[in-house]
Image (cartoon, helix red, strand yellow):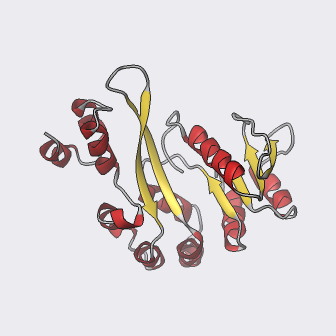
Amino acid sequence: LTGPTGSGKSTTLACMVDYINTHKACHIITIEDPVEYYHHSSESLINQRELGAHTHSFANALRSALREDPDVILVGEMRDLDTISLALTAAETGHLVMSTLHTSSAIKAIDRVIDIYPAGQKDQIRSMLSESLEAVIAQKLVPSKDGKGRIPACEVMIASTAIRNLIREDRIYQIPSIIQSGGVDGMQSLDQDLQRLVANGKIERKTAVEIADNPKLFKSNVL
């Protein structure tokens, strides 16, 4: 999950954890800085750790978590190479790993992960990502039309076969076109979601144009 500071990433992650906790029997470990939402075990067993109180770093907590046989691991933020490497290892070994980055789009999130590695490791990381990545959601909060709050607008990239191939072959720049046409796989661009929100009367057209990835095209498509 990616987006700027204050875009509701922690709230969305908490909702994901709550959904799993409500619908599936599994072991969930969260590692956060700080813990913003407290969960009570329901169908799942949940253990929450906080930096400072329970661990010195995300990386240390991840190492510990991997020894406790979790099914789901939430890492509040992937801040450094060590944490990203451990998260990828956890995903490769069959754990569902959820985390956040501070980027404005799905492809920038993928680039951020790859770029943190030395040049000699990038091909290996592309291969690992292409096999273990399930989805990237890029989220922004948009003022609602009634002025009573903010509404999430999301770009959703699902790791389809086409997406996995583009990551592996270092053709990440082609991913937006796959997202644009990937509705059947559950994908949507930010501008497509903004268009839906305008059509449903949730946000103002002017606001959507200001936030859109392609304002000129968006303006011509949404009357």
Q: Nearer the viewer, residue 33 or 154?
A: 154
Q: Quadrant of residue 177?
A: bottom left
Q: Nearer the viewer, residue 75 or 221?
A: 221
| Spot occupied by residue 49 in the image (x, y as percentages of width and height) | 81, 44
Q: Quadrant of residue 206?
A: top left
Q: Residue placed at 49% from the left, 36% from the top?
A: 7
Q: Is residue 184 left or right of residue 75?
A: left
- Residue 49 appears anywhere in the view: yes
| Spot occupied by residue 80 in the image (x, y as percentages of width and height) | 66, 54
| Spot occupied by residue 17 in the image (x, y as percentages of width and height) | 67, 48
Please determine whether, in this image, residue 59 is positioned above or below residue 67. Answer: above
Q: Residue placed at 41% from the left, 20% from the top?
A: 148
Residue furthest toward the top?
A: 147
Q: Residue placed at 80% from the left, 61% from the top?
A: 70
Q: Residue placed at 43% from the left, 29% from the top?
A: 150
- Residue 75 appears anywhere in the view: no
Location of the C terminus by quadrant is top left
Q: Quadrant of residue 25?
A: bottom right
Please determine whether, in this image, residue 99 is positioned above or below residue 146. Answer: below
Q: Is residue 93 left or right of residue 127?
A: right
Q: How many marks?
A: 0
| Spot occupied by residue 97 in the image (x, y as percentages of width and height) | 66, 60
